[in-house]
Amino acid sequence: MQVGELVRFNEETFFDGAVQLRWVQERPEQARAAARAFVFHGPRYHAAGEARQDGIDAGYRLQDTASLVAELLESFQAGLRGEERNPFTLAVAGYGSGKSHLATAIAHLLGAPADATADAILSHLTQADAELGRAVTEGVAALGKPVLVLCLDGMAGFHLGNALSQAVFAQLERYGVDAGPIRDLSPRFQTATEFVRRNLALRAEAFATRLPGLDAEAICARLAVQDEAVYAEVDALYAEANGVPIPVTGQESAQDLIQTLCEVYCGAEGPFAGVLILFDEFGRYLEYAADRPALAGDAALQQVFQGGLDHRLVQNRGGG
């Protein structure tokens, strides 16, 4: 008898390559399938002994995935109780160990706790450790609301402030929640939108040169989610027409964004229990920021950090 006769690969959980956190927004069905297929490890058999034999310093805290999720839920509960906790955690593991896959599962568990996908995730976690499974199940139920999960994938080489804003708009649209308070932080985008609607027909050639293939509705749709690249072109057209760029007013730093999310959208009166920033491939983003700081919007990193300290409902978990 051969091994192939005893073991069969489950083709339903083959995702044509490594799971990526960006699937949550870009390929939602595949992301849900991946989240349902994640296999948790409990504290009794997560191979800590083998890890030490492989050269990992014993001074590092090795943790299983079930315990990590349990601690995340407990941290949220502590925040709701008004307790101060360190809102930042860096998860580091070897290549191909499942960091992105775990982040995808967490995004679905907390972002849609009433969904069948969340039930499957909780079932798998309980299989890994019954006690932790009960704790996580109770913790999710105690939140009473979904968590606003913002997924960032550092492999994309993005401008951090822009990526964070677009993640917020995408999620608010998904939940059917009014994004007006977020748009109010950046009135320049509304000014740009009004300029496009009033001037595109009059300046069609100039618009076609700077924004080829985009009509007024397409341009305004991108401005609505605060696309900085499109805004820059509209701002240049505005300056050509008026002699000055669009006035910049308001409070639109990443720190202001986080503050508004926590104060307006979270808590007893808001639709969300809290905010969770899942930052995958954080190391790759840092490489990009070091090489191209202006394009990476590296100043937003400090603003996110400060915003997280100011509002303990925010958790930032980065993949190594």
Image (tube, helix red, strand yellow):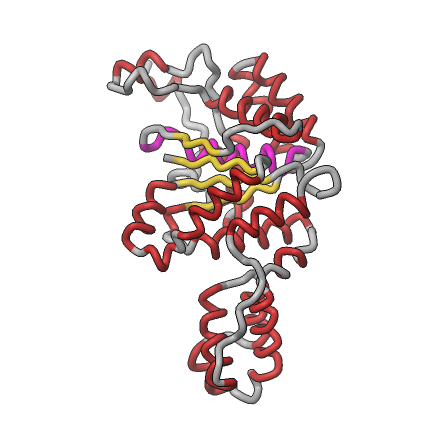
Q: The N terminus is located in which quarter? A: top left
Q: Is residue 211 left or right of residue 192?
A: left
Question: Between 100 and 72, which is closer to the camera in this rendering?
Answer: 72
Question: Between 27 and 147, which is closer to the camera in this rendering?
Answer: 147
Residue at 69% from the left image edge and 51% from the top image edge: 177
Choose top left, top right, bottom left or bottom right for residue 56: top left
- Magenta includes 316? no
Q: Is residue 112 left or right of residue 268?
A: left
In the current view of this chain or complex, which residue is farthest to the right? 269
- Magenta includes 97? yes
Q: Is residue 207 visible?
A: no
* x then y, percent, for residue 70: 55, 22
Q: Is residue 222 above or below residue 45?
A: below
Residue range highlighted in magenta: 95-113
Choose top left, top right, bottom left or bottom right for residue 218: bottom right
Residue at 57% from the left image edge and 78% from the top image edge: 196
* x then y, percent, for residue 41: 46, 19
* x then y, percent, for residue 305: 47, 42
Q: Is residue 128 above or below residue 169?
A: above
